[in-house]
Image (cartoon, rainbow, N blue to C red):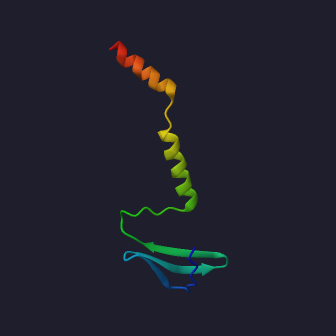
Amino acid sequence: MLVLTRRLKESIMIGDDIEISILSIEGDQVKLGISAPKNVDIHRKEIYLSIQQENSSATQTDAGAIESLSNFFKKQ
């Protein structure tokens, strides 16, 4: 992990097109601004993990459902 120290209104660059800026610091909260191309998804980690879990659940196949579909199309 790379650890960087930045002050208010300073930034870091990731590659050529992603900029992360320190917008404000209030107590133990730091507000970040992220400028990135529209094709780059940006999520809080807990949201990202939730999306990953939902995607994983959606790809799980139910053997009973597949068998039901198979039987349905065999009757046709």
Q: Quadrant of the N terminus?
A: bottom right
What residue sits 55% from the left and 75% below the top? 31
Q: Is residue 9 above or below residue 63?
A: below
Q: Nearer the viewer, residue 15 or 34?
A: 15
What residue sits 51% from the left and 51% below the top? 51
Q: Is residue 11 above or below residue 56?
A: below
What residue sits 54% from the left and 62% below the top? 44
Q: Nearer the viewer, residue 10 or 59?
A: 59
Q: Which residue, as the protein is rendered here, is positioned at the far front?
A: 1
Quarter of the image for residue 70 reads top left
Q: x, y (%) of residue 56?
A: 51, 44
Q: Which residue, as the protein is rendered here, is positioned at the far right?
A: 27
Q: Quadrant of the C terminus?
A: top left
What residue sits 49% from the left and 33% below the top? 61
Q: Which residue, as the protein is rendered here, is positioned at the far top?
A: 75
Q: x, y (%) of residue 24?
A: 56, 80
Relative side of 50 to 67, left or right: right
Q: Nearer the viewer, residue 17 or 43?
A: 17
Q: x, y (%) of residue 34?
A: 46, 73
